[in-house]
Image (tube, rainbow, N blue to C red):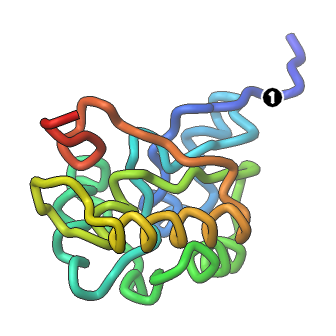
Amino acid sequence: MLSPGFIDVHAHSDLYMFNDSSIYPKIAQGITTDVSGNCGVSCAPISIEYFEHLKKYMSGLGAGINPPENWKDFTTFENYLNEINKLKLGPNVAFYVGQGTIRIAVMGFENRRATNEEMRKMKDLVREAMESGAVGMSTGLISPRCIHPEG
């Protein structure tokens, strides 16, 4: 059988590709395009103030994986994609910016509604990500970082 390749539209290779840029397990299964940044979780943008919150938030996706040494430099989505572009990747890749990651960058783990100023900052971060090359914004509606209990 011959196939043109498969697209994994729900990947969580965000951190993995910094450890194995070939993402060989995907290629071995015929996956030629990997879409990461799903479930409201992405590696960027980060804020230094809430960086430890993002590390904790992403810990389930990166179990046993060493994050990139310069992760703290991913204060913009553009910085993140520039680092991705330095890797010798196996498959094609595309990334969503995570809504939970955006919220953490502005508010940390605060369990409250965003202020108008925080909403403006979050919109600016999403705009920057989209202009830099994110293919969209993902949410994780079961994640406390992507929803607020008051609606």
- SS class of the residue under badge 1? loop
Toward the viewer: 116 or 85? 116
Looking at the picture, how far across and down is residue 119, in whole percent?
39, 64
Residue 51 location, quadrant? bottom left
Screen quadrant of the N terminus? top right
> Farthest residue in the top direction?
1
Looking at the picture, how far across and down is residue 37, in whole percent?
50, 50
Q: Which residue is mark 1?
A: 5
The amino acid type, in three-letter code, at marker 1 is: Gly
- Left or right of residue 22: residue 114: left
Toward the viewer: 37 or 24? 37
Residue drawn at (38%, 76%) of the image? 46
Toward the viewer: 42 or 19? 42
Looking at the picture, how far across and down is residue 23, in whole percent?
58, 51
- Left or right of residue 60: residue 61: right
Looking at the picture, how far across and down is residue 42, in whole percent?
44, 57
Crowd tier of the residue under label 1, counting other residues whose Cα lies within 10 Å: few below 14, some 14–19, many 20 or above: few
Residue drawn at (27%, 56%) of the image? 58
Residue drawn at (23%, 53%) of the image? 63
The relative height of residue 125 versus residue 99 in the rendered view (above or below) is below
Number of marks: 1
The relative height of residue 72 versus residue 136 in the rendered view (above or below) is below
